[in-house]
Amino acid sequence: MFAFRLSVLLPFFFLLITTVNALHFYLDANEKRCFVEELPSDTVVEGHYRALEWSDGTQQYILNEELGIIVEVEEMETSHVVTKTRGPSDGRFTFTSHEAGDHSICISTNYTSWWSSTHIKLYLDIVVGSTKPDIESDRTHIGELSSKLRDLNQKLDEIRREQQYQREREADFRNLSENTNSKAVWYSVLQIGVLIATCTWQLRHLKRFFADKR
């Protein structure tokens, strides 16, 4: 079994693994090839592999549907098996790191015979994703945002009610002012009428008084 540290021994291929499209290597049918990757906790890792088997008849690597690929991921510090899957010759695997540290990613075939001389050419594409989202933290954050939005809506409703109340008060004050102005105008007209009537009566009285004196 061969092991390589992706972040140290093969920086050319795995330093920014998300940009690698066609890394490939060779292994025998009964061989297990392992890689070591240092991962932070709660990190999603996705892999895609495609295994081709050497054919003596065609003298080339071909896709064999009977060929199966076993992927086993283990935390090296605790020897905890994160995942172990068996898939077809062209498949995918996904796992999430539970603890930060070195993880061994081992790939082997379903051929168990030590006398098998089959050679495998395997294409491997590994994508180390971002940290797994904290759902509980997101829910708490969403809850806080919802509470703030409710408070904001309540304040907006209070502002709208206050504006409506002010508009109603302005309308009442305007009506009262117009009514008061109207009464003041009629009162002035009445005063003028009384004054004119008084002046007319006095003039007549004086005219009659002087006429009697003659």
Image: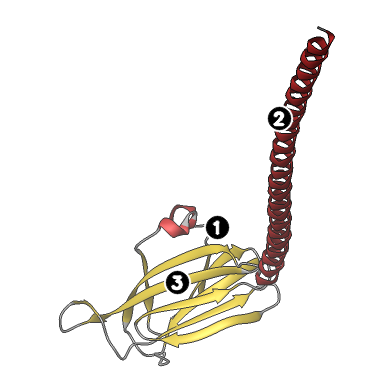
Q: Residue furthest left?
A: 58
Residue 63 in the figure: left or right of residue 180 = left
Q: Earlier in the sequence, mark 1 or mark 2?
A: 1
Q: Which residue is mark 2?
A: 189
The type of colouring in the image is secondary structure
Residue 50 in the figure: left or right of residue 13 = left
Q: Are marks 1 and 2 in contact (CB under 8 Å)?
A: no
Quarter placement of the C terminus: top right
Q: Position of residue 181 (x, y in %)?
A: 72, 35
Q: Which residue is mark 1?
A: 7
Tell me: residue 64, above or below residue 182.
below
Q: Amino acid at mark 2?
A: Val
Q: Is residue 32 visible in this depiction of the protein?
A: no
* Residue for point 56% across, 77% down: 73
* Residue for point 45% across, 52% down: 12
Along the line of sight, which residue is nearer the eye, 156 or 195?
Answer: 195
* Residue for point 40% across, 93% down: 113
Q: Which residue is mark 3?
A: 47
Q: Earlier in the sequence, mark 3 or mark 1?
A: 1
Q: Amino acid at mark 1?
A: Ser
Q: Position of residue 153 (x, y in %)?
A: 68, 59
Q: Earlier in the sequence, mark 3 or mark 2?
A: 3
Q: CA distance from mark 3 to mark 2?
A: 98 Å
